[in-house]
Image (tube, rainbow, N blue to C red):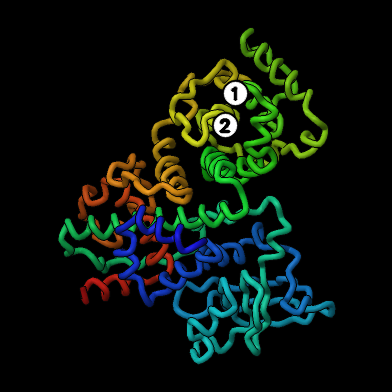
Amino acid sequence: MNAILSKSLEACFPRAADYRRGTVGNGVHESTTAFRHFPYRERHLQCLWADPRLRPVQLATTDGEPVVVEQPGDWNLEAGPDFHNAVLLIGKERRRIAGDLEIHIHPTGWNQHGHANDPRYADVRFHIVYFQGPEIPGLIQIPLQETLATNPRFSFENIDLTAYPYSIPSGDFPLLGMHPDRKIQWLESAGEERLRLKAERFAFATQNKEPDQLLWEELMAALGYKNNKTPFRQLAAILPLMRLRSLAKSPAEAYALLLGLSGLLPPNSDPSWDAATRKFIRNVWDFWWKQSGELKEQSLNKFDWNLAGIRPANHPVRRLMAAAHYAFQLPDPALTDVPPNHWTTYISWKSKCEPTALVGQSRANAIITNILVPWRAATGATELDLDHLPVEPSNSIIRQTAHTLFGPDHTPKTYCSALARQGLIQIFHDYLITHRLDEIRKWFAAN
């Protein structure tokens, strides 16, 4: 990301720097610098390494020796190496090596963080890095960038950082006595930092893809919610926005393409459907069957979707209808103005659900704050009305962080603004899951 755009983002989120000033020396500041080249956190790599569903199978050392993971190690939530007691099989002869494991974005992180002279890292044998680079003497280095690039279905954006182990201290609330106004100021500065980092990641992504395509992919992922972000993002990559607009001349035709590609298009009509729905699905099939075999070969299937426990109103066949409308509205989608049609009320294909809006206000608010505002900043906007962002509903992370910082008797008025809630999420990732609450206490005591 160039210096001009970096300054532009700072101008869009002027209070973000106030939050960063309190994070110097705790590792967060280093991560921000790393975003100039890689817009994710070391924690993304930690989650990837810990989860066998995400960890690449075809691993190799910097020297090209194949690597088989026998035991990824025990995730360490305290100070010291990222993982203890890892066991890897190295080389064609499958040499079995055991030891601790450390993860960095760049190989230089080992020396920058002072690990070489830290006795807690004496048993580290493996250095997992994203970028290739000079090896650290005595460590087996395993770079990930090239391996991950060969998997078109992988995206760091699909990693839910909150789903992995973390440690929350209790009983000692570091900001219990802070003045309410100062609490709000700090939370909102953290919120601006969260949005600035999102914008920075988007700006990074636009180096390799068109801004409208990036927005299309992010919007599709948001429509997938947590359980189906991956298949929605895959659809956006298989059928880029420009190609979708060239093949479809209306939202109905766009929906036929998306539903056909999703693998969720029912093969047969159901007797319970009304006449309008049967006609609509016939039209969908007629349009889908006209498409090229090459496009059909890229279709997903129902096993790519997580449909268990999904509320009918959130079903992918409804969200895809919304996406079909948004495809003709980007970059300024009318988020809540997409009414359901006959077909999208038959979620189970057996019975009807209530004909509610395809995208509710809460989801629309989340898209505005987490996608549209950072995207606009990343693509050159210079003025953003951050004080009037729509407020997302509270969630477990927001409540957990507020409780940990302010105690059980705090007032929710402290985080009633959209920025304050974004701030609590940022603090959760920077301090709570990294076990750094003491640094908050020390910084505020000194300031």
Relative to 268, residue 56 above or below: below
Q: Is residue 438 above or below residue 244?
A: below
Quarter residue 233 falls in: top right
Indicate the position of residue 264 as horizontal and vertical percent values. 68, 30
304 left or right, relative to 339: right
Q: Secondary structure at mark 1?
A: helix
Q: Quadrant of the C terminus?
A: bottom left
Q: Secondary structure at mark 2?
A: loop
In this view, the residue in front, 425 or 89, is 425
Mark 2 and mark 1 in contact? Answer it, CB < 8 Å: yes
The spot of residue 360 in percent (x, y) is: 43, 30
Q: Earlier in the sequence, mark 2 or mark 1?
A: 1
Residue where numbered disc 2 is placed: 327
Q: Nearer the viewer, residue 108 or 222?
A: 108
Residue 283, given in percent of the width and then of the height, sits at 70, 16
Q: How many marks?
A: 2
Residue extending farthest front: 4
Is 81 placed above or below 184 here? below
- Judging depth in this view, the residue of 445 and 401 nearest the camera is 445
Q: Residues within 10 Å of mark 2 (few under 14, many from 20)?
A: many
**Distance CA(mark 2)–CA(mark 1):** 8 Å
Residue for point 84% across, 77% down = 92
Residue 227 visible: no
In the rendered image, which quarter is residue 376 located in? top left
Residue type pointed to by label 1? Pro
Residue 251 - label: 1
Residue 365, image quadrant? top left
Q: Residue furthest top?
A: 275
- The residue at 45%/24% (across/down) is 337
Residue at horizontal 65 percent and vertical 83 percent from the top: 135
Which amino acid type is shown beneath numbered disc 2?
Answer: Ala
Q: Relative to the observer, which residue lies in front, 109 or 444?
A: 109
